[in-house]
Image (cartoon, coloured by chain):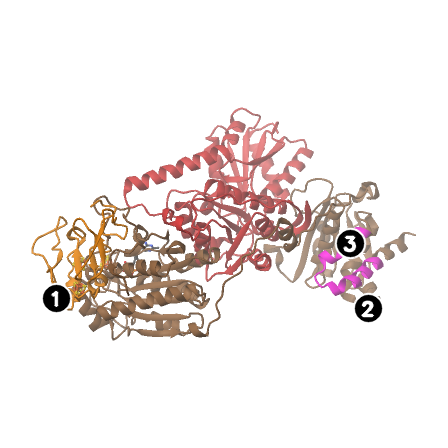
Chain colours: A red, B orange, C brown
Amino acid sequence: MAREFIKGNEAIVKAALLAGCRAFYGYPITPASEIAHAAAKYFPRLGRTFLQAESEIASIQMVYGASACGQRVMTASSSPGISLKQEGLSYLAGSELPCLVVDIMRGGPGLGNIAPEQSDYNQIVKGGGHGNYKNIVLSPNSAQEMCDLTMLAFELADKWRNPTVLLADGYIGQMMEPVDFPEAVLEVPEKPWALQGEAADADRLINSIYLVPEILEDHNRQLQRKYAKIEEEEVRYEEYLVEDAELVLVGYGIVSRILRSVVERARGEGRKVGLLRPITLFPFPKVRLRELAEGGTAQVFLVSEMSNGQMVDDVRLAVAERIPVEFYGRMGGCVPSVEEILEVVGETVRKHGATV
Amino acid sequence: MTSQSRGTDTAGTAGGTRVLEAHVTVVDPELCKGCGLCVAACPPGVLSLAPSFNSKGYHPARYSGAGCTGCGFCFYACPEPAAVTVYKKGAEVPAEGGI
Amino acid sequence: MAKKILRKPAGFYDVFERKPGDQLTTHYCPGCGHGNVHKLLAEAVVDLGIQDRTILVSPVGCSVFAFYYFKTGNIQVAHGRAPAVATGIKRALPHAVVVSYQGDGDLAAIGGNHILQSANRGEQITVLFINNAIYGMTGGQMAPTTVLGMRTTTTPYGRKVNNEGPPIRVVELLSSLDGPAYLERTALWDNKAIRRTRTAIRNALQCQIDGLGFSMVEILSPCPSGWKLNPDEAHEWMRENMAPVFPPGLKKDVRAEREPFFPEKRELTAEEIRAAVDLQIEEPTPYPSELVKPEYADPAIKLAGFGGQGVLSAGAILANAGMEQGFQTSWIPSYGPEMRGGTAHCFVHISRHAIGSPTVSNPDVLVAFNRPSLEKFEPELKPGGLLLYDSTIIDVTPKRTDIEVLAVPATGLADELGFSRMANTVMVGAYVAKTGILSREAIEQTLPLAIKRQNLVETNRKGLARGIEFVEGLES
Ligand SMILES: Cc1ncc(C[n+]2csc(CCOP(=O)(O)OP(=O)(O)O)c2C)c(N)n1
Ligand code: SF4
Ligand code: SF4
Ligand code: SF4
């Protein structure tokens, strides 16, 4: 184990190299540029590719090319740049090409600002580009997870031949924490479908065009079956004191760290508050949320996001009005404080008459 | 002719070969789109569009049967991969059947 | 060309995987130039012996289905993006011969920047650029290469210089760049022109094979359907209308001056990879927690001052050393809306437990390096909390009485050591000595990790010692 006190943004790059990532194609944007800086430093040291592309549109297409050749490959950007990458993401999904896209979310819409927001949830989890596709979406809440989930992202991407997005925010990216980097480097699986610059390539085609409606529908059906399997097999979440919780907080990324402190403070005041943190945003832990709504002690969910309320829609779909789902959000780069949310917890309890 | 071997380099030569004594240009009427570019490209003017139609409704090009110089212009003028084949004098072709 | 038989080149698939009944012909209109270029390319990859390692990139346009035909690697890509995709492929597979096959809408309009940038990078790819002065696939709209006066479905009155501007001459444009090695414009309007096109395509591919850099052939090519002309007329029209605007010829050829470039391939062991990313395997030295004075355990610390006072690195030194001793730690700089007014601050947690929110509204410890920070953040400090401030430069005293206050003349002490900018490490020393939270050794050990300029590490070590001595002097 190698331990380092390191920024989340840099941990991503080291983890990617340990995961066998061969190329990084980027375009500068705050607050994701540190990832490109670290990549520019480390990738060439290993004889791997770092290239600053002419745009986010180009960088994701370079990723498309590299992935088509079987390489583990990545790009990183922040919200406005991710909007530009949506074209490429749709093509990657359509051609079933694995890759890692890191989104260090910032304030929007438009140029917004460079402060942390979580307002890319919809454009990343719900698609964003055209077509019936899904990204696998992982949401780290610590520097350690910037490492772990980066490595996992490459594995999931290859396992499912699907683009995977690490959805983080400027806060997690900027934060320094101890990270235990694994000792082993990852093996990259065989990819018999990938172009190799050899004779067998003539039997391989990387493609997303299917002119005949029935054939395109078949392709889409196959994609939907894949997404259904991903929902069965890859859901990841973390719970904190939910067993007896009457109010369950739900949040991801940096918000989940704040919510953890909220739980501690609330418990200190004798309130039965717990936390469910989705780690995978697609697949979403909807089964677990339903269980909590149905059978457990939970009487109300309180979802908090640094957005206008995007993930909360998925919570509501999962809970299907079995118990109330309340929302508290901040926008524009404002980060909710522990006290602020504690107060909302109090209001929520008053409103729903939970005994907590 | 099976569709696999039709007009391609992989046409078999089982059953022996013969050597051509004159240049011959062959147009596969079913693979021709009747664009006429080969006709315009042929210096001695030994290609023409047939008055008849192929199954796609095109007037296919055809070789008059004599006068080909083996220059190959028709081959490169033709946009279709397999419509035109130019056999030059001395080429080895299957002994049996047409070319 | 000593071939005895000219027939469908083996660079094509025997059977094209398209509509049943049409598996030996292309989907192109009669007389379309795409077909001619396909044939020349299919023949060239065989003759040059590169068929097995050729990868054809086909973007959107009438040639979107080029992958039906070429018995090579094939990849279908988004409109205009082929040079970017080709870049990713070539960097991944330097031995491959990567061909980007693009129309004029694709290359010169939506993909304009991609072609410019990949040419400028000298990307080792070959571009075949079909200039037919129109968007064929989508129904005969204007292309960047549509000539003035030409009627298209989106210039029904003819292209006008004051509305659409004049046509773009792509190879001339690219020839002003230093990146490309080989740029030529050819045409398909007669036998001689086709022969030249054949040679140019081969030159361009050979350029890539030899590792000499970016190569491109712009080919003036008929689109009889888009132009509403029969194939013969289309050739005539090209010569009359396109030749004057797009004169064929070799526009750039610096192959002879180029050094071949073939990137070396490196396979590293796990150990080499770890070393290259600066990861050393080390176990932390757990810190005997009984040394921490209980009232100071698990602090949430806010350090604040002017930018340039080393506030952020003081925080990083503490958090780094905390990690070294087996604590959970976090460090986060002021960020977002807090970043106004020239003050910088950061939060540090050093805890025996998992850390929730990395920021806190009411810290346990405030380390104030300037007066605005003291005044602004003193009220936030938790009752019973600890306040350290630089009494050399802060000319007011804290107001609260429900907290513990330690005035440290940090800048003064640093100045005595000859380096006033070291006030931050003096402060770190004072804090550590006061609370027992970390061992001096751990901090000394991690200094080099937190301090960017390595020549300052020794000086900072002295500052640290001075801070510790200062507090020990107070306590004894
Ligand atoms: C993003 C996007 N915009 C528009 C289109 C529609 N489209 C398909 S092909 C094409 C133009 C192709 O023209 P050109 O590149 O000149 O090739 P040609 O068809 O003439 O060979 C357009 C606009 C598309 N597929 N994708
Ligand atoms: S090879 Fe030359 S002479 Fe013979 S048919 Fe073709 S173009 Fe005419
Ligand atoms: S050029 Fe080819 S497609 Fe056109 S008429 Fe001649 S053989 Fe037929
Ligand atoms: S529309 Fe034009 S470019 Fe497209 S296939 Fe027809 S002739 Fe060729």
The residue that disc 1 covers is B45
Does residue B61 lie above or below A169 as drawn? below
Q: Circle 3 — which element?
A: helix
Q: Residues within 10 Å of mark 3 (few under 14, many from 20)?
A: some
Q: Quadrant of ligand 4?
A: bottom left
Query: Toward the viewer: A183 or C306?
Result: A183
The residue that disc 3 covers is C445
Residue located at (54% from left, 33% from top): A301
The residue that disc 2 covers is C418
Q: Residue furthest left?
A: B51
Q: Circle 2 — which element?
A: loop
The location of residue C231, given as percent across then percent down, is: 17, 63
In the rendered structure, the residue with mark 1 lies on which chain?
B
- Residue A109 in sight here: no
Residue located at (24% from left, 45% from top): C19
Q: In the rendered view, does C283 fall on the left or right side of A18?
A: right
Q: Residue furthest right?
A: C476
Residue C69 shown in magenta: no
Read off the magenta span: C441-466
Measured Cα–Cα span from mark 1 to mark 2: 98 Å
Does the beta carbon of the residue at mark 1 sit less than 8 Å from ligand 2? yes
Q: Quadrant of the N terminus of chain C?
A: bottom left
Residue located at (90% from left, 55% from top): C473
Q: Residues within 10 Å of mark 1 (few under 14, many from 20)?
A: some
Residue located at (25% from left, 70% from top): C193
Does residue B23 lie above or below A19 as drawn? below
The location of residue A145, given as percent across then percent down, is: 60, 44
- Residue A63 in sight here: yes
Same chain for labels 3 and 2? Say yes or no.
yes
Q: Amino acid at mark 3?
A: Gln
